[in-house]
């Protein structure tokens, strides 16, 4: 260092430091996570392309078959599936693992910041991201003629419910990230997505499913989520159709958040 | 000594990992405004004690305070007053340097204005110019270390922990870090707790040095005090044959205060080196089946202190450290 340029000017008085508070910590963590997203587009592009790809392929391959067994509007039937594909498993868990392995996670623990905000801030960023990922899927849906029986407010509810499902699911990759600190383990958490997304009413209505698939679909929370989203598209505001999907989100979220925050407690434990 | 004069205190601190005692009953005090060098080989327990003092670990037994606050019971108060640069520069490659500094300020409750003013001050310290607005992934190792140090200083800490701050740095970067540490201590009166495995680093920077080995604090004092325990001078003798016989012969000499045997090498503490050389050479010539390969006289070093209290050499980074000294003091002949 050149000493002629590096003299430190001491603060006139000692800087007043204090805990920033939970909300400021939360916004700081979220903002950092969101700022990093466009800097690593490779991490987001698959999440953007996969739902659009499946939406187009499923319509092209199955529309006539589905209409033959009584699905009135297969495009509207498939739009919630594309949304689930867009939002499920999208998280900053890989970035969290990078922070753990680089030591930056320890640097954060050395500050007086809220430990809960450390994880919840990432989840808030995920919520923003997955809701943003819903937009191109919706645009494609409108482009191919899908309409909402619930109008503009239904569109907003559709995106919000999709976002909340994405948020509920993020607990799983975060739990794995915090328990293992392993990038490979976090990447493999994507496998959890497949039984959730395919052993359900992704391609056919529930009444058309038979045998073991029908049984599994009955217990798969995505079955109820898809029913709720489809109801917003085709039935209008029908509370009896909405609450099962919201309950499914609540149950999955409770399980995954319990796992994730339990893993966080273990990771930040000083004992 | 009043409580306000003590920046760091440890009383019988232990840390166990299963059956392993990584830190074994360490007690020490660091005065406010002091640079305390914590010296020991890899795996001695330096980093574990540092992680206890900066609240990343709790002690299994004993008590420690930093800036007057208990590290186990009041970690939040300690975190507000301690700055820490751990062994590896802990940074986020996707952010720019200025973004990271601003974020760090937010976590300490600094207003946007205060953070900006502080970042401007620290920009002079890290001395990476316009690179501060580049992503950290593009920085060199030395730049990352300097930014890491700046992050530890954002909140103007009372106590600064530096865990092996120069490990892995080239000699020029190492010399710069030494300058920065001195300046922080002298200009800002900051207490510095510096762990290192480099003897010369502790010798150059520290007001006092604690030597840790296998989890225990085995010696403590100013570098001069520690070296005085060895004697005025040190004679190094390398022999063929049985070094134990040679040691036995040398122990009888009046000027020789202590003899350490380490393989074929004997380290002799002597009260007057120039006068002792001749009797030593004569005594060695009379030891049967022993031939002197090398005989040299030098001032005691902290390595000699380490050898005398542990029976082992700490490490041998002398060539690298000599380069660092040369980089720091280019006017001195090498």
Image (cartoon, helix red, strand yellow):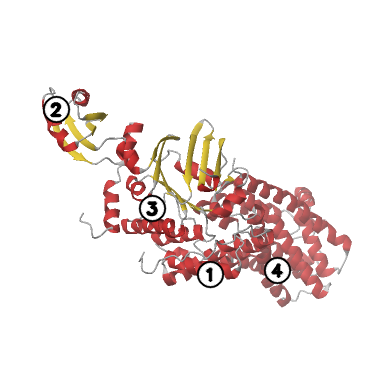
Measure how far apart labels 2 and 3 are at the Cα level. 41 Å
Asked if badge 2 and badge 3 are on a common chain, one would say yes
Is A24 displayed left or right of B64 in the figure? right
Q: Nearer the viewer, mark 3 or mark 1?
A: 1
Q: Nearer the viewer, mark 2 or mark 3?
A: 2
Q: Earlier in the sequence, mark 2 or mark 1?
A: 1
Q: Position of residue A2 (x, y in %)?
A: 35, 66
Q: Determine the chain carrying the residue at label 1.
A: B
Residue indicated by mark 1: B117
On the image, which quarter does residue A51 sit in? Answer: bottom right
- Tell me where residue B111 sits by quadrant: bottom right
Q: Which residue is mark 3?
A: B166
Give the number of callouts.
4
Residue B284's tag is 2
Secondary element at tag 1: helix
Q: Which residue is mark 4?
A: A59
């Amino acid at each position: 260092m050149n000493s002629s340029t590096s003299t430190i000017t001491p603060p006139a008085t000692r800087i007043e430091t204090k805990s920033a508070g939970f909300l400021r910590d939360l916004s700081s963590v979220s903002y950092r996570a969101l700022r990093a997203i466009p800097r690593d587009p490779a991490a987001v592009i698959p999440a953007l392309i996969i739902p659009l790809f499946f939406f187009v392929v499923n319509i092209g391959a199955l529309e006539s078959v589905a209409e033959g067994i009584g699905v009135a509007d297969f495009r509207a039937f498939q739009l919630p599936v594309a949304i689930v594909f867009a939002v499920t498993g999208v998280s900053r868990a890989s970035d969290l693992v990078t922070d753990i392995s680089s030591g930056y996670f320890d640097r954060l623990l050395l500050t007086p910041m809220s430990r809960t905000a450390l994880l919840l801030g990432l989840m808030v960023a995920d919520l923003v991201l997955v809701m943003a990922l819903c937009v191109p899927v919706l645009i494609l849906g409108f482009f191919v003629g899908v309409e909402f029986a619930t109008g503009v407010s239904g569109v907003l509810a559709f995106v919000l419910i999709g976002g909340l499902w994405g948020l509920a699911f993020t607990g799983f990759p975060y739990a794995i990230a915090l328990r293992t600190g392993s990038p490979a383990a976090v990447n493999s958490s994507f496998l959890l997505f497949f039984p959730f997304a395919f052993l359900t009413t992704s391609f056919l209505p529930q009444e058309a499913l038979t045998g073991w698939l029908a049984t599994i679909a009955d217990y798969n929370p995505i079955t109820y989520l898809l029913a709720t989203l489809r109801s917003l598209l085709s039935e209008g505001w029908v509370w009896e159709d909405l609450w099962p999907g919201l309950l499914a989100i609540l149950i999955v979220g409770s399980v995954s958040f319990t796992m994730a925050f339990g893993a966080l407690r273990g990771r930040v434990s000083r004992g | 000594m009043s409580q306000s004069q003590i920046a760091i205190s440890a009383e019988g601190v232990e840390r166990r990992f299963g059956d392993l005692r990584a830190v074994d009953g360490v007690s020490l005090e660091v005065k406010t405004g002091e640079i305390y060098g914590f010296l020991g080989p890899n795996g001695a327990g330096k980093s574990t004690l540092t992680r206890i003092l900066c609240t990343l670990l709790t002690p299994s037994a004993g008590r420690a305070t930093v800036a007057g606050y208990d590290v186990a019971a009041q970690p939040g108060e300690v975190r507000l007053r301690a700055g820490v640069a751990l062994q590896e520069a802990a940074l986020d490659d996707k952010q720019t340097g200025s973004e990271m500094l601003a974020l760090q300020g937010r976590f300490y409750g600094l207003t946007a204005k205060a953070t900006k003013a502080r970042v401007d001050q620290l920009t002079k310290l890290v001395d990476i110019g316009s690179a501060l607005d580049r992503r950290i992934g593009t920085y060199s190792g030395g730049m990352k270390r300097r930014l890491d140090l700046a992050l530890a200083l954002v909140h103007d800490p009372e106590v600064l922990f530096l865990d092996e701050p120069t490990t892995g740095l080239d000699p020029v970067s190492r010399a710069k870090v030494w300058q920065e540490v001195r300046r922080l201590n002298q200009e800002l009166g900051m207490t510095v707790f510096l762990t290192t495995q480099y003897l010369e680093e502790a010798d150059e920077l520290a007001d006092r040095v604690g030597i840790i080995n296998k989890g225990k604090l085995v010696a403590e004092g100013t570098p001069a005090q520690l070296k005085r325990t060895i004697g005025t001078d040190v004679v190094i003798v390398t022999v063929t044959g049985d070094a134990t016989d040679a040691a036995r012969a040398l122990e009888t000499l009046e000027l020789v205060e202590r003899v350490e045997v380490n393989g074929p090498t004997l380290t002799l503490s002597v009260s007057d080196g120039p006068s002792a050389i001749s009797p030593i050479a004569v005594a060695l010539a009379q030891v049967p089946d022993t031939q002197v390969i090398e005989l040299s006289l030098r001032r005691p070093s902290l390595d000699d202190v380490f050898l005398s209290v542990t029976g082992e050499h700490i490490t041998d980074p002398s060539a690298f450290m000599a380069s660092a000294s040369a980089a720091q003091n280019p006017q001195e002949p090498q």
